[in-house]
Image (cartoon, grey):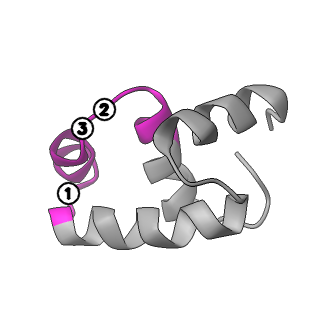
Amino acid sequence: MLPTLTDRESEVAQLLVQGRSYKEIADNLSITLETVRWHIKNIYPKVGVHSRSELAWKTLRHPR
């Protein structure tokens, strides 16, 4: 994704961009829903977005 993200944040962001729900992300990564929310809370400002759709758009414009 973008270089400012941790490995775990990148995993969460990739699943989010794929359209996975928070619960699916939590189950896939074996973390709690609250942890998913925490990562997303940290991801959005780092990437400079406010929503899942903005994150997807930015990811498409700046792939790794």
Q: Position of residue 53 (x, y in %)?
A: 53, 33
Between disc 3 and disc 1, whose residue precedes?
3
Q: Is residue 43 visible?
A: yes
Looking at the picture, which amino acid does disc 2 mark? Arg
Disc 2 to disc 3, C-alpha distance: 4 Å
> Dot 1: what SS?
loop
Quarter placement of the N terminus: top right
Residue 20 part of the magenta-drawn span: yes
Residue sitting at x 42%, y 39%: 16
Foreground pick, 61 / 29: 61
Name above or below for residue 57 compared with residue 16.
above
The boundaries of the magenta stretch are 14-33
Q: Which residue is mark 1?
A: 30
> Dot 2: what SS?
loop
Q: Which residue is mark 3?
A: 21
Q: On the rendered structure, is 4 left or right of 35? A: right
Q: Position of residue 60 (x, y in %)?
A: 73, 26
Q: In this view, which residue lies farthest toward the front?
A: 50
Q: On the rendered structure, is 19 left or right of 47? A: left
Between disc 1 and disc 2, whose residue precedes?
2
Disc 3 to disc 1, C-alpha distance: 14 Å
Residue sitting at x 43%, y 62%: 40
Residue 1 part of the magenta-drawn span: no
Looking at the picture, which amino acid does disc 3 mark? Ser
Crowd class of label 3 (few under 14; some 14 to 19; many from 20; radius 10 Å):
some
Residue sitting at x 30%, y 62%: 36
Q: Are marks 2 and 3 in contact (CB under 8 Å)?
A: yes
Q: Which residue is mark 2?
A: 20
Residue sitting at x 52%, y 61%: 9
